[in-house]
Image: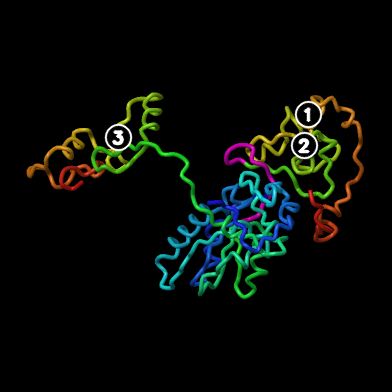
Amino acid sequence: MIVGEHKPIEEIIESVKEYNNVLVVGCQTCVAVSLTGGDRAARLMTEALSHAFKDRKTLHIFENSMLERQCEKDWIEPFFDLPEGVEAILSLACGAGVQTMADVFKGIPVLPGLNTTFIGALDAAGVLNEKCVGCGDCLLGLTGGICPIARCAKRLLNGPCGGSSNGKCEISISLGRDVECAWHLIVERLKELDKLDNYEKISETKNWAPGGAGGPRQLVHPGETPF
Amino acid sequence: MAFFKVNENCNGCLACVQNCPAGALNYFDQEDSRKILHNMSLCARCGHCWRVCPQDAIEFKVLLTGRFDLVTTLDLVHCKVCGEPIYTASLGATVSNNTQTIEPLCPDHKGSEPVNVWKKLAPKRTSQPKESSNPERVPIGDDV
């Protein structure tokens, strides 16, 4: 899922301070699961902002409102009642959600409350790890289901490098936490799968165009095939 | 109450059933009637059925604003000083088994000493001090 982190509260306060009536809008899908954009996060953000502006002469009204997904344009208008007098919207959605809201409510500034960080997986309660960068040309079939692009600091296609030690990446030292060497994991997994011959296949230079280097990507379904 | 509501515009064309990406919609024809089924456990709430329905027959807002269901009911333990509900009897039993017997006291009265609790429970006396000399301690007697 898409993972987002809260922007520093000081940055949010700075971005909303010029508006008297701000609507905090959560998103109930990806970022709700990463515990930063759901209903609870929207309520906490509203409380924090109400507290931050309580001594100001200007009246700040922060109201909660929920959307199942802020990234679906045709869904927003019919199911979303914008309260009267709202001067700005603080969106607790990923970047796609913020842009969709801005597209729908063109006359109202839509401000981001989150920093969209990565596509990740929930490995334990409250622990999300990056697992995919959306490179557009998935090679997980060759690497035992472990992505060397998302999980190797150098994005090596033919690894590991010399910085792998006891299964850990050398960036563990600078990050202050253990980071698994993706290529160590790949080799171990390929051994388990009895597919070590995959490791002998040298990957050629990757085409990054499907990964976004060729401009904004688009997916158009030609039509639905009934089941 | 069903979370998935279809209004009288539905003409049974099955566009929703055929296009549901989660397989949460199904149908069967029985004698003279066609029945359309929805499985909330499978539903991804993607809204695709609502988008493709040519009849505007799917009341998707009902699904988005569904009510809460009662899932279980448990006995409560109340604070023995003020009567505020604090935890369930079941939780109290679990914690007591794992550690030690816990006093049924709310956060406000947890810091008070047993004698102070007793004073609260006992009939009020006019000789009780008005304020506690120790600010760390919970006020007792008439000030509680």
Question: Which is more toward the observer, A81 or A129?
Answer: A81
Amino acid carrying mark 1 in the image: Arg
Instruction: Give the left or right position of residue B44, taking residue A60 as reference.
Output: right
Left or right? Give the position of B17 relative to A198: left
Q: What residue type is labelled 3?
A: Pro
Marking on residue B104: 3
Query: Residue type at mark 2?
Result: Ile
List x then y, in percent, for residue A150: 75, 43
Mark nearer the viewer, 3 or 2: 3
Q: What residue range appears in magenta?
A: A113-127
Kindly identify which chain the residue marked by label 2 belongs to.
A
Residue at the image point whose x is 49% and y is 49% from the top: B68
B8 inside magenta stretch: no
Q: Which of B70 and A145 is in front in this view?
A: B70
Q: Main secondary structure of the magenta part?
A: strand
Within 10 angstroms of label 1, few (less than 14), some, or many (20 or more) residues? some
Q: What whole-number distance in Å separates the C-alpha atoms at marks 2 and 1?
A: 8 Å
Which labelled disc corresponds to residue A146? Answer: 2
Provide the secondary structure element on which disc 2 rests.
loop
Does residue B39 sit above or below B14 in this rendering? above
Please indicate whether residue A65 sits to the left or right of residue B35 in the image. Answer: left
**Residue A99 seen anywhere in this rendered image of the structure:** no
Q: Is mark 1 on a helix, strand or loop?
A: helix
Gap in angstroms between the C-alphas marked 3 and 2 = 51 Å
Quarter of the figure with residue A199: top right
Residue extending furthest toward the front: B31
Q: Mark 1 points at which residue?
A: A189
Q: Can residue A203 be seen in this view?
A: yes
Specify few, some or many for label 2: CA neighbours under 10 Å numbering under 14, 14-19, or 20 or more: many
Secondary structure category for the residue under label 3: loop
Residue B132 in picture, x, y percent from top left: 18, 44
Q: Is residue A55 depicted above or below A160 in this figure?
A: below
